[in-house]
Each structure stands twice: as C-alpha cells, then as structure tokens.
Image: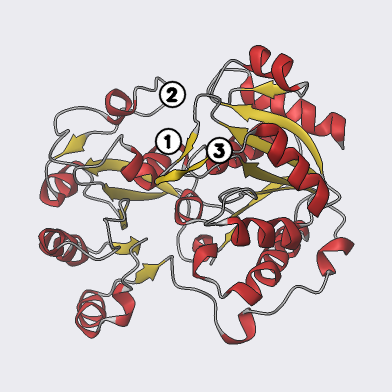
Amino acid sequence: MNLHDAFDAPAPAVVLAEGKFGTPEGKTANGVVMHSELFDSQAVVDSTAAGQSASDVLNRDDVPDVPVVASVEDALEAAPNAEALVIGVAPAGGKLPEEWVEDIKEAMRAGCDVVSGLHTFLSADCQWADIADEFGVQLFDVRKPPEGDDVRVGDGRVDDVDADVILTLGTDCAVGKRTTAFELYRAARDAGLDAGWVATGQTGLMVGAHRGVVIDRVPADFTAGVVEDLVCDVAADHDFVVVEGQAALTHRAYSGVTLSLLHGANPDAVVLVDDPNRTGRADFERFSVAGVEAEIEAIGALSDATVAALSTWGDGETEAEKHGLPAANVYDEDGPSELLEAVRESL
C-alpha cells in the first residue's frame, strides 16, 4: 500500500488513541504523532489524557505541542481543516469498539477520510461504505493484504537492485525495529543520501513509508515475494533503502515472518535492535530471549548479510563493549547518525 498516492503530505489529521496514547498499546498513534511525514497531527483524541499536549504525554521535547482532547468533536474544533482521522490503536481482538462508532461517523461527516489499522476492515462493511459514499470520503484499511497479481513467490530479482539495502531485525518483538528503521532513514536523508524506506507494519504505513504492507496478513508462501517487490520498487527510485523488520529469527512464534523478510529483502547489512534488560519474550511468558549473539549467529547462518550495528535501549558504549559491535541508542541525540556511520562503514 502507498498512502502517498491518496494524500498530499503532510495532510492535516486527527489521531484517535482513546485510552492508549503514550502507552505501548497506542504505539501507532505515538508513531504517527512523533514521526509521520504523511500526516500533520493537529489533535489527539484520548479522554484519559485530555488537557495535556502530545509532548507532555510522550515525554519528548522534539514532539510538537499537539493538543490532546476528549472527543472527536473537540478535535475538529481544534483542527477544523483536518482531512483524515487516523485510528491509532488496535484494540484487543482488532474489532471496532462500539463507543468509537459515533466519533468516527462525526469525523466522516466533517469530510475526513478514515485510515484504519483495525483487523476488521471498514471498507468491507456496507454500512461504513455507504456512509463514506454519502459524505464523499474514503476508507483506508492498511491491514488489507495484497491480492491476485500483487502477490507472488520470491524469485531473487532483489539481487539485481543497485541500491544498498539495510534491514532492521530484533532480538524480540516490540523492541523498536520500526523506530530504528525510520530514524536510520531520516539520518541517511539528513546526511544527503537518496534514501527511501519500506514498512512492514501498520504504523510504518501511517508514518509515510515509500512502500509497505502489513506483512502478518500476507499468506506465508508469498511473504518473501511481496517484500522483494516492495524493496525493488523503492530501490528503483532511491540509492539507500531501509526495510522495517518484524519479530526475531529465534522467536518460536513468529520466526517464519522474520525469515521471509530476511530472504525477501536480501539485505546488504542488518541493524539488530535489542532491549538489554529484557529476559522474557513480550507476551510469551514461557519463552526466553535468546540474546544478541544467538540472533547474530542465526542471521549469519541464513543470509549473506553483515550485522553492522546494534540499536540498543541501553547505553551505546556499554553495549558496544559487551558485544564487540558498534552500538547506539536511537533516542540519544547522535544515536541515529552513529548507527548510520556504522552501516556505511560496513557497506
């Protein structure tokens, strides 16, 4: 999916994050407000944090002072020119909460397109489609998988691209692969490189990746081929391509998608993302984190890529000494540029 075809960036937007803004469950809303090059967030809806600003809630000085309000009605007063309502939370089960229905309808009546990451596709529901037609707005379900001629098995065509391809992989889920991919892309662009990036999750698509897909919705046989196509598309227009990874090769539940990403992207370099304080896997009590060395070994056994650097939640110098690998924290001021330097030296 390429949302850039639908919006003139940066499009003014309202972000719906009811009850979850600033929490891990609201990571899509957090990412859109912090990083989006596609949407200009002008108000965030979260009644539990109303009256604060986004920079207060996210505790980031580099985040705009976007108001957090209690309802879509309040958001539209703060952002009367909003063109989109971005649903920035995927509730448990992925279904649309009943209490959000009227808020979404109100935004559509005001002329807002709806960009949704729900597992339930609004565009497939006749009721929502009729409302969209009535008010002349569009419904974008970013989790909707490609179909028909848009899916194929990988055939190695990515080997022929001229661009440098960098993939972010992790030691676990929810360690910051998307954030690292975006910060690395932004650092490359700031350094004067002709950089583009590929998203493999809903947040990256909403942030404004050049191409992307929610990879966990693609049938397994076609995952590598879809990623290969995305990388080839972005590499046709850019010299430096960053690809967002998912999960971990050593993760018993999700390693299949990670391996498909590794083979489909066929990266020249990998930036490994790690939380040094995490011992158990997120949401899997009986699984332990295998660790940095085990992940590097797996990457080397399954690809020709070089692990160029470690993106760490900890102190870069400490982790670099511990693992014998360039390391930096992307939330430190110079962290992204240090990772970029390590990648370029590796290339």
Mark 3 — residue?
A: 289
**Nearer to the camera, 308 or 31:** 308
> Residue 332: x and y, percent?
56, 18
Say what secondary structure mark 2 lies in.
loop
Q: Amino acid at mark 2?
A: Asp
Label 2 neighbour load within 10 Å: few <14, some 14-19, many 20+: few
Q: Earlier in the sequence, mark 2 or mark 3?
A: 2
Q: In which quarter of the view is residue 311 placed?
A: top right
Say what secondary structure mark 3 lies in.
loop
Measure how far apart labels 2 and 3 are at the Cα level.
32 Å
Q: In which quarter of the view is residue 92 placed?
A: bottom left
Q: Amino acid at mark 1?
A: Met
**Nearer to the camera, 104 or 119:** 119
Label 1 neighbour load within 10 Å: few <14, some 14-19, many 20+: many
Q: Find out whether the residues at labels 2 and 1 contact each other: C-beta distance under 8 Å.
A: yes
> Residue 164: x and y, percent?
82, 47
Q: Is residue 142 left or right of residue 175?
A: left
Mark in the foreground, 2 or 3: 3
Mark in the foreground, 1 or 3: 3
Vertical side of 81 occupied by 307: above or below: above
Mark 1 — residue?
A: 34
Measure how far apart labels 2 and 1 are at the Cα level.
8 Å
Q: Earlier in the sequence, mark 2 or mark 1?
A: 1
